[in-house]
Amino acid sequence: MTHTYEELLEKNRKYLWNPFTQMKTYLADEPLIIASGQGVKVTDARGKEYYDANASVWLNPHGHNRQELNDAIIEQLGQIAHSTLLGSANIPALLLAERLVQITPERLQKVFYSDSGAASVEIGLKMAYQYWNNKGRPEKCTLLTMKNAYHGDTVGAVSVGGIDGFHKTFEKLLFHTEKVSYPYPYRFNGTAEECVQACLTELEQKLIEKADQIAGMIIEPMVQGAGGMIMMPAGFLKQVEALCRKYDVLMLVDEVATGFGRTGKMFACEHDGVQPDIMMVGKKLTGGYLPVAVTLTSDEVYDAFYGEHRERKTFYHGHSYTGNQLGCAVALASLDIYEKDQTVAHVQRMSEAIKPLLQEIETLDHVGEVRQLGLMIGIELVADKASRRMYDWMEARGASVCRRAVDLGLLTRPLDDVVTFMPPLVSTQEELTDMLRILRQAIQEVTEP
Ligand SMILES: *Cc1c(COP(=O)(O)O)cnc(C)c1O
């Protein structure tokens, strides 16, 4: 059954409420209805092609319609699509758990499945909380988090988030957390080192005062993604780890955005050689195909839950689709592609190759800073370059740039006035060059009319 574009638009108007979307603007601006994808491009229901320059919101590593991934799902379908992980196991979930333990930091030895990044965060938070409970220290029940953090949209994940634009509305619904500053040198009055030092001092002070009540600290390693693509200076994460150890606080790292090669390492933790107690991954885990996420933890945390039924140490958490076979099968096939294509090395090469183009964009009159780690890139727009003055929020410049880019054949999304560039990891130098040409043109047309 085929539908005209007009018919589909009408269905969007009538029936669909899109996430993270002001429907009035979206419907007025001409909704985008994707029909197919191939490699780094997607095609809308009218047949117009676009670069998928944010990898379908940070998911897609190997390109769309990848034969090996399609085949893995079809093969698994011939066996079984889903059976529960509550009190039983399945073959792809076991094989994937083993693979994940092998490729993540050494401390992480156990895998707990879920189906979205937000759920994996909820699980990590509850694990940290119950860990201390099971250890006989129930007073360690607060989470420490970073200002401007993003960990997903469920209530627990929002509680540890810190982006006012998304989170403020729900304030009264949230549980209490402790918050510390994240290093953002571009917007700090002083040098990058002074910025880092100020943040570390603040963190240590907080731990001196409150560590007795703190179960764990959750952090986006190396990059705050949704907070504006803000990279922490090298070495900061290692210091955070050292402070967590010193004050006996679990370290939880949210690798949902950064994991699986995005930053030029398989996991961002590797940049600073950090060994977290709990790690969340999702997004690219299944090659961008199906919703599987994972919370990994150490033997030490696992052991605190291990005991007789009557000891009441069981972790009572689970989701209907936990450990879904189709998702785990395609995740295994995705990991095979990482090996075969040497995806992470490719990201490193491409991230070097595009540096000159990013530097050119940084010289534009209304670009303040271009931030990059691997193929995780944010272009910060400013009203005035010299004073770093921001545009009035109401002007929605970032959104205008992205809308112009859509006309020019490239999809991405803004984070306020930070234009994100998160191409599929498989993108070639030629494709990246073309994508950046379009982005640059969109920025110039919108900011230098
Ligand atoms: C996207 C994201 C999440 C939430 O993942 P969902 O699958 O969208 O629930 C959590 N943390 C970070 C760092 C993310 O980028």
Image (cartoon, rainbow, N blue to C red):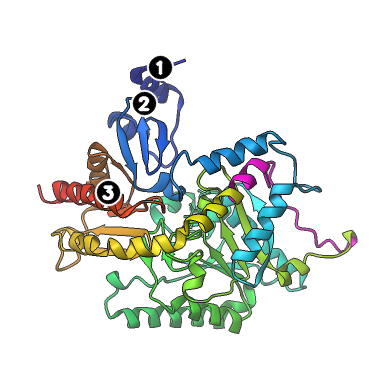
Q: Which residue is mark 1?
A: 3
Q: Compared with residue 5, is residue 118 higher up or lower down, i.e. above or below?
A: below
Q: CA distance from mark 1 to mark 2?
A: 9 Å
Identity of the residue drawn at 51% across and 51% down: 283
- The residue most toward the front is 340
Q: Amino acid at mark 2?
A: Ala
Q: Amino acid at mark 1?
A: His
Q: Is disc 3's CB within 8 Å of ligand 1?
A: no
Q: Compared with residue 408, is residue 106 higher up or lower down, i.e. above or below?
A: below
Q: Compared with residue 314, is residue 272 higher up or lower down, i.e. above or below?
A: below
Going by the image, does 108 lie left or right of 38? right
Q: Which residue is mark 2?
A: 45
Going by the image, does 407 lie left or right of 334? left
Front residue (pair 169, 401): 401
- The residue most toward the left is 449
Q: Earlier in the sequence, mark 3 or mark 2?
A: 2
Mark 1 and mark 2 in contact? Answer it, CB < 8 Å.
yes
Q: Amino acid at mark 3?
A: Met
- Specify the segment rendered in magenta: 310-331
Identity of the residue drawn at 28% across and 80% down: 191
Q: Compared with residue 74, is residue 62 higher up or lower down, i.e. above or below?
A: below
- Give the percent coordinates (x, y) of residue 93: 69, 50
- Give the percent coordinates (x, y) of residue 32: 34, 32
Q: CA distance from mark 3 to mark 2?
A: 21 Å
Q: Which residue is mark 3?
A: 435
